[in-house]
Image (cartoon, grey):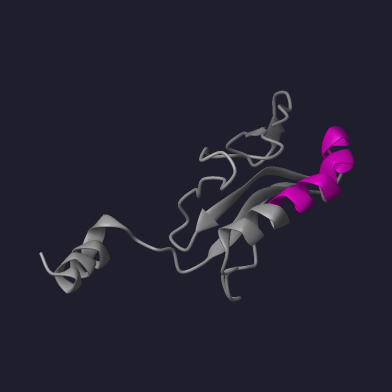
Amino acid sequence: MKIADGLKLIEDGWIRKPKGFRVKFHMQTEAGVEAGLSPPPEAAPLSSDVTAWRYAWKLWQATRVAAETGAPGALYNITVVDDQDHPFRFYGTGECETYNPKRIDNGGNAAGEDNET
């Protein structure tokens, strides 16, 4: 197989390179819990999964105290998604990671116990 044919095969479906990354989370508000993305959908996505994971980790660290008390501004279920909103594996472990995981009920309220990553 010619290299050009092989590259075409890869491009057509075997490996898809994401066009960008966002941090997905649930945010505690006065009214309950709302889903969010950073950067928001109308803004340009982050170009690097490493940058997105570092950003996610920093958001988690910055809101840990609020998350322990359920205060407005707390972030739960912080993870990185690609341009198609699919979870993206953490570069350090190859596993899907979620910082500050918390079950959210159908009404948009935090339910159950916190679990730390």
Tell me: 50 left or right of 76: left
Q: In this view, does 90 lie above or below 49?
A: above
Q: Quarter holding the N terminus?
A: bottom left
Residue at the farthest top position = 113
Of residues 68 and 45, the one nearer the viewer is: 45
**Residue located 64% across and 53% down the image:** 53
Of residues 58 and 43, the one nearer the viewer is: 58
- Residue 64: in magenta span: yes
Q: Position of residue 108 (x, y in %)?
A: 65, 42
Tell me: 31 left or right of 53: right
Q: Give the range drawn in magenta.
A: 56-70
**Residue located 87% across and 42% down the image:** 66
Task: State which quadrant residue 111 falls in.
Answer: top right
Q: Is residue 82 above or below residue 63?
A: below
Q: How many marks?
A: 0
Q: Quarter holding the C terminus?
A: top right
Q: Is the magenta stretch mostly helix, strand or loop?
A: helix
Q: In this view, does 11 lie above or below 54?
A: below
Task: State which quadrant residue 17 falls in.
Answer: bottom left
Can residue 95 be seen by looking at this rendering? yes
Q: Position of residue 92 (x, y in %)?
A: 59, 43
Of residues 112 and 9, the one nearer the viewer is: 9
**Residue located 44% across and 63% down the image:** 18
Tell me: 72 left or right of 88: right
